Amino acid sequence: MPKFKLIISDSSGKSRSLEVEGVQSTPFLGRRVGEMVQGSVLGLRGSLLITGGSDKDGFPLVPSVRGGVKKSILLSEGVGFRAKFEGERRRKLVRGNLITEDVVQINLRLLEEPDVSGAQTETKTEKERDKEKDKDKDKEKKERDRNGERGREGEGEREGGGEGKRGRH
C-alpha cells in the first residue's frame, strides 16, 4: 500500500500536514487533479479538492497531462516552471494528473459544505472574496492616482539600464 503526505489547506489560508497509509490511502489512488474526495475518509467535514502534488522524485503533477506517466513537455508558464525572462519556453519533465503509487505528496483544499438545515448562512464563496479584493485594489489604485502617487505599474523608466527583454546574461 502506498504512503501519502497530504497537505490540506482551508479557506483561511492555513494548511496542515497529514500522513496516511494503508486503507486510508486507497480513496486517493486512481483519482485525478481537480477531482473531489469526501472529507469523511480522513475524519473531516466537507469535501476535499485535489489541487496538485508531487512524485517520489519531486516532479509536480500537472493537470493538463493525462495519465500517471512522466512526460517531458514544453512549458512557458504554469505548474513546474518559472521563467527567467519574458516569453521564455523550456522543456520540463512533469508527471501526469493521475495519482499513482509513485506519488508521495498530495495537495488538497478543504471545501466546506453549506448547512442545509434551513438556516441562512452568510459565508462567501472564494470567487466573491476575490472580486472584493480586486475592488479594494482598484479603489487603492484610484486613490493613489488622485494623490499623485504612482505605484510600480505606473513607473515610466525600466530599471536595469536597458538590457532589453532577456536581461543580462
Image (spheres, rainbow, N blue to C red):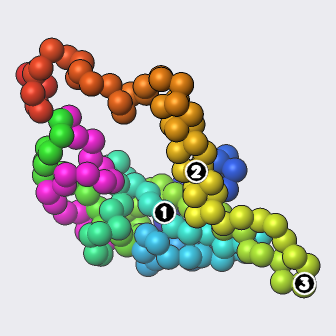
Q: Is disc 1 placed on a helix, strand or loop?
A: strand
Tell me the CA gap for discs 2 and 3.
Answer: 33 Å
Q: Amino acid at mark 2?
A: Lys
Q: Quadrant of residue 158?
A: top left
Q: Please state which of the two labelled residues, at mark 2 or mark 1, is closer to the viewer.
A: 2
Q: Amino acid at mark 1?
A: Thr
Q: Nearer the viewer, residue 21 or 29?
A: 29
Q: Which residue is mark 1?
A: 51
Q: Is disc 3 placed on a helix, strand or loop?
A: loop
* Quadrant of image for the C terminus: top left
- The percent position of residue 26, horizontal first and vertical second, equals 55, 75
User: Which comes sooner in the sequence, label 1 or label 3?
Assistant: 1
Q: Is disc 2 placed on a helix, strand or loop?
A: helix
Q: Which residue is mark 3?
A: 117
Is 150 on the left-hand or right-hand side of 83?
right
Q: Residue at 52% of width from left, 30% of height from top? A: 146
Q: Please state which of the two labelled residues, at mark 1 or mark 3, is closer to the viewer.
A: 3
Tell me the CA gap for discs 1 and 3.
Answer: 29 Å
Is 90 on the left-hand or right-hand side of 47?
left
Q: Which mark is residue 135?
A: 2
Disc 2 vs disc 3: Cβ atoms closer than 8 Å? no
User: Which comes sooner in the sequence, label 2 or label 3?
Assistant: 3
Q: Judge whether residue 83 is colored magenta.
A: yes
- The percent position of residue 22, horizontal first and vertical second, equals 59, 68
The secondary structure that most of the magenta stretch takes on is: loop
Q: Amino acid at mark 3?
A: Ser
**Residues in magenta, as a range:** 68-84
Q: Judge whether residue 128 is colored magenta.
A: no
Tell me the CA gap for discs 2 and 1.
Answer: 26 Å
Is residue 27 depicted above or below 143 in this figure? below
Q: Quadrant of residue 88?
A: top left
